[in-house]
Image (cartoon, rainbow, N blue to C red):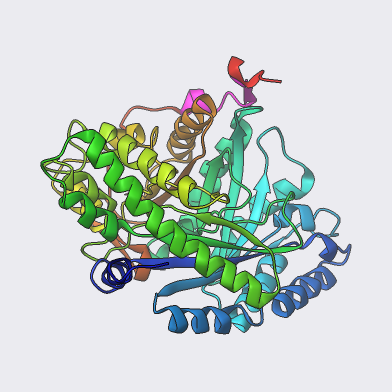
């Protein structure tokens, strides 16, 4: 039974500490939408999404009012479109992105993920067509998000795909030049991608998932930051325990919302993702959590250790609270979406190299980072390769969501608004990686992949 103190704690988390359910994401299988005629396949995609998700937004809004907790986003993820489109007689997969976009608009969700391909060991014809369609697809739609998995611990790193993604990111930025390269904010390149991630832009509905499912993403950087500030004089054991207990409370709330939504939609409940996903709002920052631990500014010496403690404690608290923790789960460090990260970059405390080091222990990887618009495809590919290597060697998910801002130079700023925020343009290394990236082929899997 809940005590009055626990009820008041929860109310305070929502009202004062910016606790929210970041997203309810409905996963939908589109494997039965394949058709040789791309227009018919597109129509099947539209029909199935609108049929299954027609009540997603109103039910989410009802639950938010009933429980008194904000549910910020309602979203959809679908089967990787490269699989759905494989049998279609077309070279251009934009038709599928357009069908997804129309369906998302019809049901009222803000994003739909799954314009995706899994190419960690090689590319089929459908994979190649999808990847080559990404720049136009993201430029000509509003809600569609794309992702490509280029590496796994079992397969190694597909460097042909990595190089291709460097070119695709450049082209996507150019095609959305008038919006500071916004298309790249909807594109993620992964290693070891999870199949049940509810967060955009990397969400898709994995092939091992059911026909349809509800996954929930919970976010509470402000809650954790406030909890950490209350134990400023305590040792690391007490600090970790405080974060763990806070993550437990956040996760229980997320599971309650997720199971309620699944029940009312007549679908199975999948997972709760307990990622600490920041927003540009002051007080809703992962960087501020790290600074509350005693760092003068995020990025200084000790930042990686602090982030490792935070990530581990969040996962432990979530695992205590739910048997179905999944997705990414941990701490996100997107630059543009975190006011504290932006401040750290502007003050010179945080650079690309330190962010890369931090990704060894955080939830995902280099996220929402703006770089000069003239950054080459080879440099972008090398950044992806570095991040993929961290994921492959450490058997964890890593990702890159990087934006070469057209016409912008180091120190200038890109503006996206909303949850995407704004970001200072960060410098990249001045020495070339071109010969390395152009070798092609596949970097072999590490020896510890031989675990069977």
**Left or right of 91 on screen, residue 135:** left
Tell me if residue 263 can be seen: yes
Which image quadrant: the C terminus?
A: top right
Q: Which residues are magenta?
A: 434-446
**Relative vertical location of residue 419 with respect to residue 187 in this rendering, above or below:** below
User: Which residue is depicted at the point 72% across and 39% down?
Assistant: 123
Say which of 371 and 197 sits in front.
197
Q: Nearer the viewer, residue 145 or 227?
A: 227
Q: Residue furthest right?
A: 36
Query: At which x and y percent is residue 282?
Result: 21, 64
441 magenta-colored:
yes
Q: Is residue 368 left or right of residue 385?
A: left
In the image, what residue occupies the spot 61% across and 75% down?
104
Q: In the rendered view of the protein, which quadrant contains the N terminus?
A: bottom left
The answer to whether residue 423 shows anywhere in this view is no
Residue 30 figure quarter: bottom right
Give me the residue at 45% from left, 49% from top.
318
Residue 147 higher or lower than 68, as above or below: above
Q: Is residue 433 left or right of residue 56?
A: left
* Residue 187 location (% of width, % of height): 52, 54
């Amino acid at each position: 039974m809940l005590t009055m103190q626990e009820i008041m704690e929860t109310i305070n988390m929502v009202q004062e500490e910016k606790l929210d359910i970041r997203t309810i994401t409905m996963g939908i299988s589109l494997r039965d939408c394949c058709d040789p005629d791309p227009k018919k396949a597109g129509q099947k995609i539209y029909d199935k999404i609108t049929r299954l998700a027609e009540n997603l937004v109103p039910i989410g809004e009802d639950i938010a009012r009933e429980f008194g907790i904000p549910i910020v986003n309602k979203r959809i993820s679908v089967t990787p479109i490269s699989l759905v489109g494989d049998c279609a007689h077309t070279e251009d997969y934009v038709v599928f992105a357009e069908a997804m976009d129309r369906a998302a608009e019809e049901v009222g969700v803000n994003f739909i993920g799954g314009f995706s391909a899994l190419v960690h060991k090689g590319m089929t014809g459908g994979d190649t067509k999808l990847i080559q369609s990404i720049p136009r697809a993201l430029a000509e739609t509003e809600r569609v998000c794309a992702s490509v998995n280029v590496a796994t611990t079992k397969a190694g790193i597909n460097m042909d795909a990595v190089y291709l993604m460097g070119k695709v990111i450049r082209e996507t930025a150019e095609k959305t030049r008038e919006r500071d390269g916004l298309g790249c904010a909807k594109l993620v390149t992964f290693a070891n991608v999870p199949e049940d991630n509810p967060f955009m832009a990397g969400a898709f509905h994995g092939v091992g998932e059911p026909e349809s499912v509800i996954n929930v993403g919970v976010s509470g950087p402000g809650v954790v930051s406030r909890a950490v500030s209350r134990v400023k004089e305590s040792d690391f054991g007490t600090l970790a325990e405080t974060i763990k207990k806070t993550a437990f409370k956040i996760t229980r709330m997320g599971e309650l919302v997720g199971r309620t939504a699944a029940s009312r939609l007549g679908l199975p409940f999948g997972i709760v993702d307990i990622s600490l996903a920041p927003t540009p709002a002051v007080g809703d920052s992962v960087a501020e959590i790290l600074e509350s631990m005693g760092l003068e500014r995020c990025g200084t010496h000790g930042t990686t250790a602090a982030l490792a403690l935070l990530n581990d404690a969040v996962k432990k608290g979530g695992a205590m609270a739910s048997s179905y923790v999944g997705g990414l789960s941990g701490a996100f460090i997107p630059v543009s979406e975190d006011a504290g990260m932006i401040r750290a970059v502007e003050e010179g405390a945080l650079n690309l190299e330190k962010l890369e080091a931090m990704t060894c222990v955080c939830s995902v990887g280099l996220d929402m980072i703006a770089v000069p618009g003239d950054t080459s495809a080879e440099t972008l590919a090398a950044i992806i390769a570095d991040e993929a290597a961290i994921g492959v060697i450490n058997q964890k998910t890593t990702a890159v969501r990087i934006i070469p801002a057209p016409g912008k130079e180091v120190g200038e700023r890109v503006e996206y608004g909303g949850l995407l925020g704004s970001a200072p343009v960060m410098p990249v290394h001045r020495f070339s990686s071109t010969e390395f990236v152009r070798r092609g082929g596949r970097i072999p899997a590490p020896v510890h992949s031989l675990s069977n």
